[in-house]
Amino acid sequence: MSEELEIRADPTKPLDAVRLARERLGQNDLDDAERVVRFALDFNPTHTGLLSVLGDIAARRGDYAAAISWIEKAIDARPGDLQVRHQLINLHLDRHDLPAATDALRRALEIAPADPFLLRRMSDIANRRGDIAEAFEWADRAVVASPQDLASHNHLAWLYLSQCNFPAAELAQRVALELAPADPGVMRRMSDIAARRGDMQAALEWAELAIAAQPGQADGHIHRAWLHLMQSDMPATEAALRAAWELAPNDIGLLRRLSDFAARRGDVTQALEHAEAAITIRPFDPSGYHHLAVLHIQHGDLAAAEAALQRAIEVAPTDVGSIRRMSDVAIRRGDLTAALDWAERAIAAKPLDPSGYNHLAAVHIQRGDLPAAEAALDEAFELAPADVGLMRRRSELAARRGDLAAAVAWTERTVEARPLDPAGYSHLASLHLQKGDQAVGDATLEKALVMAPLDVSLMRRMSDFALRRGDIKATFDWAERAVAARPLDPAGHSHLSFLYLRYDDLPAAETALQQALELAPADVGLMRRMSELAVRRGDMRSAFRWAEKAVESRPLDAAGHSQQATLYLQTGDLAAAEVATRRAIELAPSDVGIQGRLAYLLIRRAAQ
């Protein structure tokens, strides 16, 4: 122990030792925190606070067995202390050990059978198991146990929202609103529900009421920014974020939102500055490095992304999110062996977490090892047999095997599990289309649209389906409805331009693309589309200019260099095409399409 700690650490004052140890934990100094606690524990061997800190330290190191052992000692010392029981429950949940968490909760409920917090936790666990009926039973018990408890009504509304049951969610939230009519948090939840059902006008009205109720709270402006971003209203989003920033300049979550917004605008420098500012404020939070890594990935800088993720893993060696993200980066690099290694490391860190096996299955699918993917999913289903995400992965795997009947069957199971979720019907409709059942696909997609009539992505999907069946009028009607519903969304204009290109209306396609680019001037996909349009017009000079602009915006994006190679090929400049193709391969070494192009180029050049 350092001299400073020896002076400050008084083993006869265990509460002071707990505070000092938690201060060290805040600086990620696990060793000194442990020294302080063990020094005090010699004099206070049954002090629950000291035992609790040792449990935290062990959990941070990934030693869950030791962590649970320390907390169980604290419970033995004070069996009626609900706080340490909560800590034990959280440890089991962090390990994804739902049976152990349930057992710990039942023991806590024996002490406090009407505790609404404990009842809500039981509801959470049932929901995580996929037992929705039991989740609602526990949620209802929490409401009955404490009818004035806002948190219980909020939890009930959240459960309904997770099932896409918007009327029931709104009804539960209105009960909360009656209890606390001036609570801005309740108003924001009403806004969330309205946004989820597609009523953006009502969502913004509730958001404004929440801000008026507490204008000095940054959360209200952050929420309003999120709503504007959903509508692709970038100026309004920026104004709301800046209003929040003035109120909370050091808020970590807000800095990351500012970073994300800057990235959406194409301002990479500012995006990175905000992300790094968040890390400076909280240097021992792995999520900050994770966020930084995602920014680097978006801009194709995989080396910088790996460096950020390595720092996250140094700070939190068992952070499976960062470990799996390392696996993702390895896939992008084309190193599937490393991707597999990182995926297996994530499972070793949390072997009871079904999402680890789901990710492993995805890696095996990338490697083309479908039996291994199937085996990984089998293990995941043993842990979470009602997990909708796993069912979707099963459907994907079946489709990759060419077994569309099985793919449909698995997707139908997701629809049964979440009958009010339009996403399930949308996916099912696509599978029917793949099977050649156009009529069934159309009918299924219409069910999704009935559930979410204002969903612009479903409108564009309806346009695509109409295109497939040759109904030109419906194709454009649905595309224009999507644009009318969300005129500031560049995706709508981009979709419309694609349709015009499909039918050789080049002036209309260019107009639509220009509108999209006005809304998203840094979107490299739109730049590449403009290049393609210029080729169709025969204007190769403009085609090269747009392609070069896309590469300048994202120099580490292989797709940009690949497009340049295509243009050089079309103009007969094989040497330049080879240079661009080799650069694309450096950035995406596992892309078989780019590799095939290089082989074709080498043959062409050898024949000259």
Image: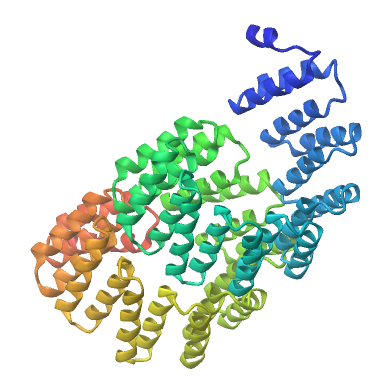
Residue 579 image position (x, y, % from top left): 20, 52
Horizontally, residue 192 falls left or right of residue 346, namely: left
Horizontally, residue 157 falls left or right of residue 606, namely: right
Nearest the camera: 608 or 569?
Answer: 569
Where the C terminus falls, by quadrant? Answer: bottom left
Nearest the camera: 500 or 12?
Answer: 12
Residue 377 image position (x, y, % from top left): 65, 63
Whether residue 401 can be seen here? yes
Horizontally, residue 143 falls left or right of residue 413, namely: right
Q: How is the image coloured?
A: rainbow
Residue 564 image position (x, y, % from top left): 20, 59
The residue that appears at 49% across and 84% down in the rendered structure is 445
Residue 418 image position (x, y, % from top left): 63, 74
Q: How many marks?
A: 0
Nearest the camera: 219 or 499?
Answer: 219
Q: Is residue 167 above or below residue 149?
A: below
Horizontally, residue 370 falls left or right of residue 280, namely: right
The residue that appears at 50% across and 61% down in the rendered structure is 366
Q: Is residue 87 above or below residue 584?
A: above
Quadrant position of residue 134: bottom right
Whether residue 599 can be seen here? no
